[in-house]
Structure formats: C-alpha cells, structure tokens
Amino acid sequence: KSHAKKNSPPPVVHYQLNNLTSTPDSIANGERVLVLTPLARFYQEYWDNLEQLNYPHELISLGFIIPKNREGNAALTALEEAIARTQSGHLENRFASITILRQDFAPPLASQDEKERHKMENQKVRREAMSRARNSLLFTTLGPSTSWVLWLDADIIETPPTLIQDLTSHDLPVIVPNCFQRYYNSDSGKQDIRPYDFNSWRDSAVARDLASTMGPDEILLEGYAEMPTYRSLMAYLANTDRPQPERVIPLDGVGGTALMVKAEVHRDGAMFPAFPFYHLVETEGFAKMASRLGYGSYGLPDYFVYHYNE
Amino acid sequence: KSHAKKNSPPPVVHYQLNNLTSTPDSIANGERVLVLTPLARFYQEYWDNLEQLNYPHELISLGFIIPKNREGNAALTALEEAIARTQSGHLENRFASITILRQDFAPPLASQDEKERHKMENQKVRREAMSRARNSLLFTTLGPSTSWVLWLDADIIETPPTLIQDLTSHDLPVIVPNCFQRYYNSDSGKQDIRPYDFNSWRDSAVARDLASTMGPDEILLEGYAEMPTYRSLMAYLANTDRPQPERVIPLDGVGGTALMVKAEVHRDGAMFPAFPFYHLVETEGFAKMASRLGYGSYGLPDYFVYHYNE
Ligand SMILES: Nc1nc2c(ncn2[C@@H]2O[C@H](COP(=O)(O)OP(=O)(O)O)[C@@H](O)[C@H]2O)c(=O)[nH]1
Ligand SMILES: Nc1nc2c(ncn2[C@@H]2O[C@H](COP(=O)(O)OP(=O)(O)O)[C@@H](O)[C@H]2O)c(=O)[nH]1
Ligand SMILES: [Mn+2]
Ligand SMILES: [Mn+2]
C-alpha cells in the first residue's frame, strides 16, 4: 500500500442537489453541461463545430460511447487525435473532462449505411441497441454537479456556436432544435436544405388509435409510408423563409440528434427505453417517460442544426 | 487560472465496458461494488453491520441520499460522525470512496413513522418519492468501473458479513435475500423472527387479472388485506427450521431493503419507475423493467437479513 494512501483517508464528497440549478442564465450561474455522443463514425466537422461552441468550455464535459467493432476502432483513433489537439491547445478551448466508453455489446447491424439503418424492419432492433448505448453512457457519466445534458449525435456537423445558451435560455425540461440537412437541389441547381430527423412530433388521434390496437411488443415508427401516423412532425413546421428561432412548440416525441435535457429529468429516472414503452422506443420513448415523470418536451421548429449528408 | 491547470490538460478517461466483469468470483476478479442507501434515519447498527462486511473495503464505494428536512439533518450529522471514525481508522476498514447527496425535493409525508408510512393511501405517493430518490442516487453515483450495485436500506441492521460474496456468487442479474425482523414473541415468551418485506414475490393469475382491469395510473400493492393478490410471497417461502441459504427461486417483483444488481442491468436502463409501470412502482417496477430488458430476478428465501424493529 502506498504511503499516500496510508495518510489520506479516502474522499467523502458532499453534494447538495437542491443547490444545483438549471436556469435560463446558465453561464452566469456557472451551470455544468454534459455533452453526450454515441459515436460510430467520426467526422472532423462534428468536432470542429463542438469546439466552436462558445459556452465556457471549462463548464463542459464530454462523454462518448463507441461500438466495439472495426468501424468503432477507426472512429476512436480519429476522436483521440482530435481530443489530443484540443486538450493541449488554447486553454479556453479545453473541455473540463472527457470520458470515452467502449460498448460491451456488438451493434446489431453489420452495416452502418444509411439505407440499411433506415429500413423499417431494422429499426426496432437498431433503436433498442441505441437505447442501451445511450443509457450506458448516461448512467456512467452523469455526475452530481451536472445541470444540463446535451445529447449530440456524431453526425451533427453544424449548429449555431451559441447552441447551449440558446437551448438553456428557454428554461424547459426537454428541448429539441429542428434537425435539417444541406443537399444539392438538382431542380434548382443550388445548395438547399431539407428536413432530416422525423422523431420530433406532436401526437395525433390516428397514432393514438393505431397504438391502441397494437400488441404490447409492437412499436410505432415515424417517417414510414407503410405506417402513416398523421402526427404533426416538427420537421414540416419549420418556416425556412422567415424563421423565428425562438418559437417554441410542445412535443410528445423527440429526436436525439441534438437534444437538451435538464439533468434532474434524467436523475428522476427518465432514460431511453430499449423496450416498447407506450409503443415507443429510444428518444421518442424518453419523451413519453419524461412526461410520465411530469416533465414536458418542447421543440424549436425554426432553430436549425444540420446532419451530415452521406 | 492556476499554474497546475495551465500545464496539465484536463483528463481523458477511457473505460472498456466489455472488460468490466460481474462474476461469481467477484473478489478474485477485483470487482467494484457500489452500496447505495437512501437514508432518512441513521442507525448505528446499520453502520456497524456495513463495516463488518468482509468483502475488501477498497473495492466498496458508498452512496447516500438524504432528505432535506430536520430528520435528514440529524441523520446526516450521525452518518458523518460514523464515516469520520471509519475512514480515519484501520486501513482495511476504510471504504474506497463515499458520496453523500442531499435531496432536491421534500419527502411527501410529514411523518416517517412506520404506521403512517405503511398506510395504503400513502403508499403511492411515498413510493414515487422513494423512486425519485433512488434514481437520483443511482444516476449520479454509478461509475464506469462499477460491477455490482448493492441496494441496502438504512434500517437493515444485521446481515451475514459475507453478504456481498454470497449474493454475487449466484451470478444472477438481480438477486434479493429474505428480509425478516427480530421481535419479542409474547406467546412463546422468547425472541423470535418474522417476515418484514413483502415486495419480493412470484406473480399470480389473480394479480394479473386484477392488473388487467386497472386504469393506467393505478398500482397493485402487496401486503394489504384490501387487495388480495394471491402472489407467492418470498417472505412466506422461508424454511426457518432447516434453512438452505443457497436455495434460489425466480421472482417477478423484488423488495429493495437489500438487493444486489449487476451494474449492466442498471446501465442498460433499469431504474425505479416513479410512475405506474405495468401497475408497479419502485423496486417492484424495477424488477419488471429488468425483465423487459431481458434480465431475470431471483430470491433467496432462506438467506436472511434483518430490518430494524421500531
Ligand atoms: N455507440 C454507438 N453509437 C452508434 C451506433 N450506431 C450509431 N451510433 C451513433 O449514434 C448516433 C445516431 O446514429 P445514426 O446511425 O446517425 O442514426 P440516424 O441518423 O438516425 O440514421 C450517431 O452519432 C452514430 O454515430 C452503435 O451501434 N453504437
Ligand atoms: N432519501 C430518502 N430516503 C428515505 C426517505 N424515506 C425513507 N427513506 C429511506 O429509504 C429506506 C426505505 O424507507 P423505509 O421508510 O424504511 O421503508 P419501509 O421499511 O418499506 O417502511 C430507508 O433506508 C429509509 O431510511 C426519503 O424521503 N428520502
Ligand atoms: Mn445520424
Ligand atoms: Mn425500512
């Protein structure tokens, strides 16, 4: 046993959860933000965008969970190089701490290609695995001094640098920006934008009726013609011509590409169900669970973040 | 900014969840155990029993959550005195680390007295608050190197010193000993034992039928004559005359007075629902959630731990 150990009793740490705030004045109140990213592929644009967030980096901790396969190994190597540069660079760019977890289960799909990922029959098993990855990351990195959790997918490559301040300023338990994608519009011959994430929605009577006829293990999926839900999708509620980035709408399901959550919502038990929960899984099931715990979810239809275009 | 900070980049920590084991050979494999206790009252006998556990203390971390009221203040003071003695005492008695959380919400009942606590109309609101306390404790203390989580109520004052080894030796996802109570039997004029915790049970057709007629927000409670469930209660399956402490039975609901959980069960998302989950809440809802995640719960009818007698 080392000398140091003999002389210093092990640490006892006290935390007053009731003194921990999550307020619209998050910077002024020194509120700690945990940015959590499940990461199967590394994009330099993701890291550059993360580094440009101008919320004080000393208040930001990062957590990653990476699958244990060849693609994951490559992503890890690239991530580590990016981290090494940032964490030895300018002081004000360095993040407070970084945790990297390797997953203890294999991803269910051999291919991470978008076409394969988005096939309806693959969605249930895929989103259950994503739920477990998100929960492992959340349960092991959320600390007693975290005020906010920002979920940010590894393929979100463009957000306003004020993303954290902007989302926390609404002081809502769960809030989600609108996730779009830049693409080349061959009709107009110009760069354009289009909706990408369809998991942020307001429920409909049709979807509720559909759910009521389902077996306990079936799930409702959004964005598939085979299963029209007539939910109001936030993706289609954007006003791209005259955006009002502060406009807020209530939601019943949320996507996880970029998602801000007050830490107390998670602490009370809201996680990402890997099993059908009211016929919902993963981030959509999370919104339902938050609602069962008394927390509302909200969306910003005119506040855009952009997904990588494969 | 301090000099130290300037020179040492912030920590990047790597964890291989797939190298983290939870095995029947927990000591030999150096598996870390997190003991979690929601604590409203401090009993010296609880602490003495905890200190006597002979699993290597350097592998044991402790976590407490204490309500923010007068009773909680008194409990905290007493706990801190006990901790100070142990953590400055014999090296081998010191625990690896200790986290104390103060709750950010008030307990729903003014009185912590047993009669008041156990009234049926108080159970739902009480167990919902207990769920939030357990989840806050779990989400903020579970680390990436924890292999096992032992839930241990603050009024469990007697267990075998080999409790941790004994429970982990079964290598089961969720396992619960039988929680009894010592009392003075005025019929026999002797000290005797009797069942205390009725939350560990095997489901019955009656309970399932009862649940199927309930509204979505109603919960099934165990141990109330007004609501006979005909579940098989582990409390009544004990063979106190010829105990076989290794005898294992499958369970559908578990109590939380003493409860061993493989950390991966929690990491996958199993928590204590503060809302009716299949008409179950708290530890009983936890067992159901673990089962939805593919993990079975088990009980040891002849392995006893003892609850304080108020
Ligand atoms: N840890 C982990 N991350 C994954 C896995 N599959 C995808 N991801 C990451 O999780 C996020 C969402 O996955 P993605 O495939 O982009 O979903 P989509 O955009 O909805 O098709 C991205 O950050 C991925 O890099 C996986 O099996 N394990
Ligand atoms: N943090 C916290 N702990 C509590 C609260 N109420 C009870 N406890 C603790 O939670 C555990 C279970 O509660 P207890 O009242 O003993 O439940 P019972 O034995 O089922 O009646 C014990 O360790 C209590 O000290 C509370 O409001 N907050
Ligand atoms: Mn994506
Ligand atoms: Mn008790």
Image (spheres, coloured by chain):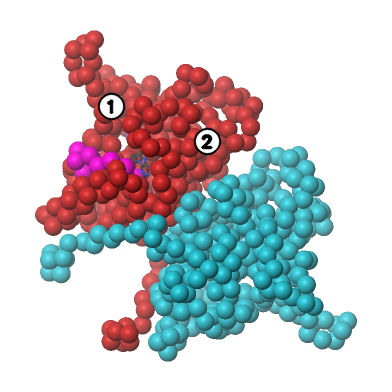
Chain colours: A red, B cyan
Which quadrant holds the C terminus of chain A? top left
Chain bearing mark 2: A
Q: What element carries label 1?
A: strand
Task: Give the residue type at disc 1.
Answer: Gln
**SS state under label 2:** loop
The answer to whether one can see residue B196 in this image is no
Look at 40% across and 87% down and name the residue there: B91
- Please name the amino acid that badge 2 sits on: Leu
From which residue to which does the magenta span run? A35-47
Residue occupying the far bottom of the picture:
B90
Q: Where is residue B199 in the image (x, y as percent from the top left)?
A: 69, 60
**Residue B199 as seen in the image, left or right of residue A188:** right
Are the numbered discs 1 and 2 placed on the same chain, yes or no? yes
Mark 2 burial class by Cα count in 10 Å: few <14, some 14-19, many 20+:
many
Residue B265: % across, % down: 51, 55
Residue located farthest toward the right when viewing the structure as drawn: B187
- N-term-proximal mark, 1 vs 2: 1
For image coordinates 77% across by 55% down, the residue present is B231
Q: Which of A234 and A25 is in front in this view?
A: A234
Q: Nearer the viewer, residue B174 or B11?
A: B174
Residue A270 on the magenta segment: no
Residue named by callout 2 = A280
Point out residue A99 in the picture as x, y percentages from the top left corner: 30, 56
